[in-house]
Image (cartoon, grey):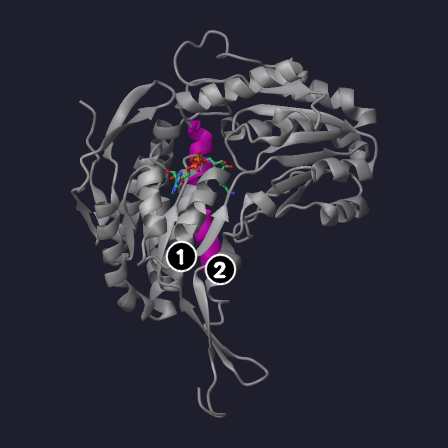
Amino acid sequence: MIPDRIQFYIGGAWTAPVSPARLSVENPATEQAIALIALGMDADIDAAVASARAAFPDWAATRPAERRAVLERVLEVTRARQADLARTITAEMGAPATMAFEEQAAVGVSHLEGFLAAFDEIPWQERLPNGTVIRREPIGVCGLITPWNWPINQIALKVLPAIATGCTCVLKPSELTPLSAMLYMEILDEAGVPAGVVNLVNGSGPVAGAALSRHPDVDMMSFTGSTRGGTAVSRDAAATVKRVTLELGGKSPNLVFADCGADLKARVAASAAECFLNSGQSCDAPTRMLVERSVYDTACEIAARVADETIVGDPTVEGDRMGPLVSAAQWSRVQGYIDGARTEGARLIAGGPGRPEGVNRGHFARPTVFADVTPDHTIWREEVFGPVLAITPFADEAEAVRLANDTDYGLAAYLQTGDPARAARVAAALRAGMVHVNGTPQSPGSPFGGYSMSGTGREGGLFGLEEYLEIKALHMPAGWN
Ligand code: NAD
């Protein structure tokens, strides 16, 4: 019997859905159903928004120190439940156990630490040199829509700043990963987040997500997902003039210069491994490797070896490995890109179509590398969202920058070089929201987000908190405040 998880978290209680629609949640490694959820409709969204609206005045009126205390308790409970979160993420989307614990679930803790560090820097009230008093106030009821690929990461980046700033919210997580989202509600509940401050309704994007985006009593929408979903949310939110922040896809370039010298092997190997992390299902994955021609053949060999040596298999086993793709639909989509790249003339140097040898169950794909990819190829332009690396040679720095910026996206960019002056020059020329030099990772509290079709917002730390605040200018007689 499949466990029944059909309730929604509304007003601080697990509540029966109005909607009769149901969906079974699949484990992508075993293709077994692991839970049954309800798919919310307009009436379910109405109930959750009403609960958030009712909770807003009291929560907005709390002192920052009270909200900080609640967040500190959330931090404690998240730490205590990190292993549960990791196991749930592995079961519902296939992230391998070690990575699920050390990265997928761990960011629930590190993002909160980043928000807490930034929290005390918010100038809730300040006076401009011209005498005007500026107040920062919570924007109101927020609609939060999240994807399946880093489920707790996206939820933490939205729910936590909403709580911190005095907003209330309704979360509609991905219908593919509802179980970690429901577990996160248990964490917030146990930590004492007051009833109605955070509410959850499961459901599909076009029904529950659209109902939330259109809802007249929602003041802001924060969306992470595909560009197609983001534009739909923007359209649905336009009639009621909501603030909309979007975190969308990417096709991030990784510029590898010959001046890496002795570090070349390590830098290329780490870059390829990062492309395959999470089975390639990361919005900021370095999927386009641009390599200086004099080291191009060597880089291709190293990347192909990393692909060949990547262990693909059961995600419940500890250690470095790659799990399945999230769903049968995602597997087919990735196969389509691999077939298309071969037809269009890219040179396959590792992996390829189908499941890895000996695997006959689960949505497992092969870590795949194409060399000689050009801007005419579909995998240059479109986000594959699978373990597929595209490699292209360049002649000089100017061509590298031109190729890197030849994309509709602008989320992340990566740079491998031994020359600090080049790093500064190239980083300034790249049109991307985040530039990583020589594998330097994102620190908690740094802004995450992109240029252009990659979105409109920044999440994490102080920048992420500001997204949830309204600015009020108070023009008062001198000496009053
Ligand atoms: P998706 O757009 O299909 O779904 C994301 C969420 O949006 C889900 O909850 C879905 O139900 C909902 N949704 C879909 N259509 C909707 C609509 N018309 N109205 C309202 N809600 C709708 O994306 P996905 O396949 O779940 O996630 C993968 C995508 O997310 C990739 O493109 C990836 O790059 C992107 N992503 C971006 C970031 C970032 O921070 N920039 C982070 C993670 C993922």
Residue at image coords 55%, 24%: 387
Which mark sits nearer the N-terminus, 1 or 2? 2
Q: Which residue is mark 2?
A: 117
Q: Which residues are magenta?
A: 95-116
Residue at the image position 24 percent from the left and 33 percent from the top: 37
Q: Specify whether residue 109 is painted magenta.
A: yes
- Check disc 2 and give the amino acid type: Ala
Mark 1–mark 2 Cα distance, whole angstroms, equals 24 Å
Location of the C terminus by quadrant is bottom left
Percent x, y of residue 110: 47, 48
Pointer 2 local density, CA inside 10 Å: few below 14, some 14–19, many at least 20 = some
Q: Is the N terminus in the top left, top right, bottom left or bottom right quadrant?
A: top left
Q: Is residue 379 left or right of residue 175?
A: right
Q: Is the shortest distance between ligand 1 and the CB of mark 2 under 8 Å?
A: no
- Residues at discs 1 and 2 in contact (Cβ within 8 Å): no
Label 2 SS: helix
Main secondary structure type of the part rendered in magenta: helix
For the residue labelled by badge 1, is the local secondary structure a helix, a strand or a loop?
Answer: strand
- Label 1: few (<14), some or many (≥20) within 10 Å? many
Identity of the residue furthest to the top in this view: 358
Residue that mark 1 sits on: 220
Residue 94 in the image, given as x and y percentages of width and height: 41, 26
Give the number of callouts: 2
